[in-house]
Amino acid sequence: MVIAHHLIWTAYGTWLPNDPRGSGSHSIAAVQLAELGELHYGRKKVQPSGRDIREFYDRAEERLLFDVIHFNAQQIQLVAEALAVAIGDFDYTCYACAIMPDHAHMIIRKHKHLAEEMIENLQASTRLRFSKSRLISPDHPLWTLGGWKRFLDSPPRVQQVIRYVEQNPTEIGLTAQKWPFVTPYDNWPFHHRKK
């Protein structure tokens, strides 16, 4: 039984279809990117070195139609504000959120929307907010389309992934993130069971 979703998506230009680590893509639409390497669906069992990944993205960056997105502190705050709007509009329950310079993690309680629909709604809200703010050009893509979903099927698993998401910012030297739209996990759906 799925009780929550771990949703992950990346900023534009930071995880390409033929990323040497593998990706969730089934095809490479841009010919100029296809020349950089083969597509591998899913994460590779043996991961490349950090140097190989940096070299891939150095070559890729000059081939992209837009600049790669790396969120600064002001932009991270703007993403958070937009996510708060979407969470309120769609009545999502968010148990954890980490907004990183190049990707986002969220744990959302099971909902009538599929995980893919939730990702699209959350991305759409942030795209609208950025378009209105004029921090980037309105035609500049903000996110890579789609994202990844992981199904969480037990309270211990939800708690484990919450800890993982909460630790993401501090692991790269950012301050811990506390967002007002995050609801403390209460052992749902077993929170009302009598002992």
Image (tube, rainbow, N blue to C red):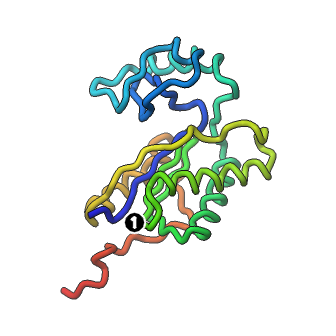
Q: Which of 99 and 133 is in front in this view?
A: 133
Q: Can residue 58 be seen in this view?
A: no
Q: Where is residue 58 in the image (x, y as percent from the top left)?
A: 58, 17
Q: Which of 39 and 79 is in front in this view?
A: 39
- Crowding near pointer 1: few (<14 within 10 Å), some, many (20+)? many
At label 1, which amino acid type do we have?
A: Lys
Reply above or below: 97 against 8.
below
User: In the rendered image, which quarter contains the N terminus?
Assistant: bottom left
Image point 18% across, 86% down: which residue?
195
In the rendered view, does 109 fall on the left or right side of 120?
Answer: left
Furthest residue to the top? 35
Q: Position of residue 75 (x, y in %)?
A: 68, 47
Furthest residue to the left? 195
Q: Where is residue 5 in the image (x, y as percent from the top left)?
A: 39, 57
Q: Nearer the viewer, residue 15 or 101?
A: 15
Say how many tags the image has.
1
Reply above or below: 103 against 3.
above
Quadrant of residue 30 in the image?
Answer: top right
Reply above or below: 109 against 99.
below
Residue corresponding to mark 1 = 110
Q: Is mark 1 on a helix, strand or loop?
A: loop
Q: Position of residue 184 (x, y in %)?
A: 43, 71
Image point 27% across, 61% down: which residue?
153
Quadrant of residue 180 in the image?
Answer: bottom right
Q: Can residue 15 be seen in this view?
A: yes
Image point 66% across, 60% down: which residue?
81
